[in-house]
Image (cartoon, rainbow, N blue to C red):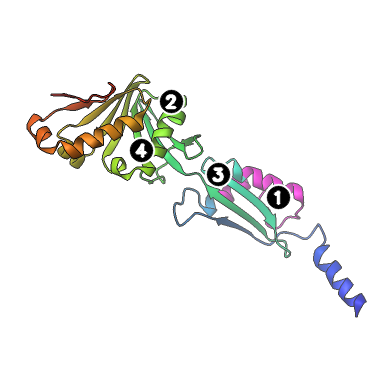
Amino acid sequence: MALMVSAVVWGFFMRPTNTPCSSIQYIIEDRDERLYVTESELDQLLRTADIHPVGKPLDRGVLQRIENAVARHPMVRTAECFSTPRNDVRVRLTQRVPLLRVVNPGDTYLIDADRKVMPSRAAVKDSVLVVTGTVGVQTASKQMADFAFWLREHTYWQRRIDHVSVQSPLMVTLYLRTEAAQEAHAKRLVMGTMTDFGQKLKKMRTFLENSGDAIREKQYTEYDLRYKGQIIGRN
């Protein structure tokens, strides 16, 4: 009996290396939240690179090449490739998560939640902060990403801010959504730099919540938040 068990264990773990792969499956962990890459697209990627495994013998080198190829896909965040005891291939992957969309003259791209540039595709329909103007990657991945993360934690302003306009790192303006503009009786908030943006918007919220009747009479076009301890309304 002991000899039979030993033989079964040996046969299970030491399958011949020339056994051909019978199938490949892509496990997209976050497909219920978003789907930026499809199984057919990944299949084509592997065929183009001549590393599609079905019908071919498997070894660790093949699995690593598949993993590397999938990980390089512009919409993939992480990838892991492994084989099953039956010599099937499984690729488990997660997709990149957009954080903000940058719209420059003649150039549109995304910054993802890892603060890296992510291509803008029609499939990306996530509702994210839009930043327009003249925005370099460094500004987008640092100051603007900081602000986008902050908005996720502050729904009061997330519901009110439509987009951000960057004329330069020294002149940033927040544009309000239609309902928020009607509430504030102004279309935009002049931030200047994004230094202490949380304090500036805290000051603005306090003003809005305590000055309803007064601001209704003014009909300002904008509020200037650049000056410490002050909010300046302009027509």
Disc 1 to disc 3, C-alpha distance? 18 Å
Query: Given contact means CB atoms under 8 Å apart, are the residues at marks 2 and 1 in contact?
Result: no
Give the quadrant of residue 131: top left
How far apart are the two marked residues, 2 and 4, measured between alpha carbons?
A: 14 Å
- Identify the residue at horizontal 21%, vertical 34% (top origin): 207
Decide which of 124, 234 is in the foreground and name it. 234
Q: Comparing marks 2 and 1, which lies closer to the viewer?
A: 2
Callout 4: 10 Å neighbours few (<14), some, many (20+)?
A: many
Q: Which mark is residue 77?
A: 3
Along the polypeptide, which appears first: circle 4 or circle 3? Answer: 3
Where disc 1 sits, the SS reads: helix
Indicate the quadrant where residue 215 lies.
top left
- Label 1 vs label 4: CA separation? 38 Å
- Residue 202 horizontal/vertical position (percent): 30, 35
Q: Using the rendered image of the protein, determine whether residue 160 is visible from the camera's viewpoint.
A: yes
Dot 1 or dot 4, earlier in sequence: 1
Q: Mark 1 belongs to which amino acid?
A: Leu
Chain-order first, disc 1 or disc 3? 1
The residue singled out by tag 4 in the image is 129
Q: Which residues are magenta?
A: 42-69
Q: Which of the pair 75/234 is nearer the observer? A: 234
Which badge, 2 or 4, is on the more N-terminal residue?
A: 4
Q: Which residue type carries mark 2?
A: Thr
Q: Position of residue 119 (x, y in %)?
A: 46, 36
Say what secondary structure mark 3 lies in: strand
Tag 1 residue: 63
The residue singled out by tag 2 in the image is 139
Q: Position of residue 25 (x, y in %)?
A: 60, 58
Is 65 colored magenta in this rendering?
yes
Is 3 left, or right, of 224 in this rendering?
right
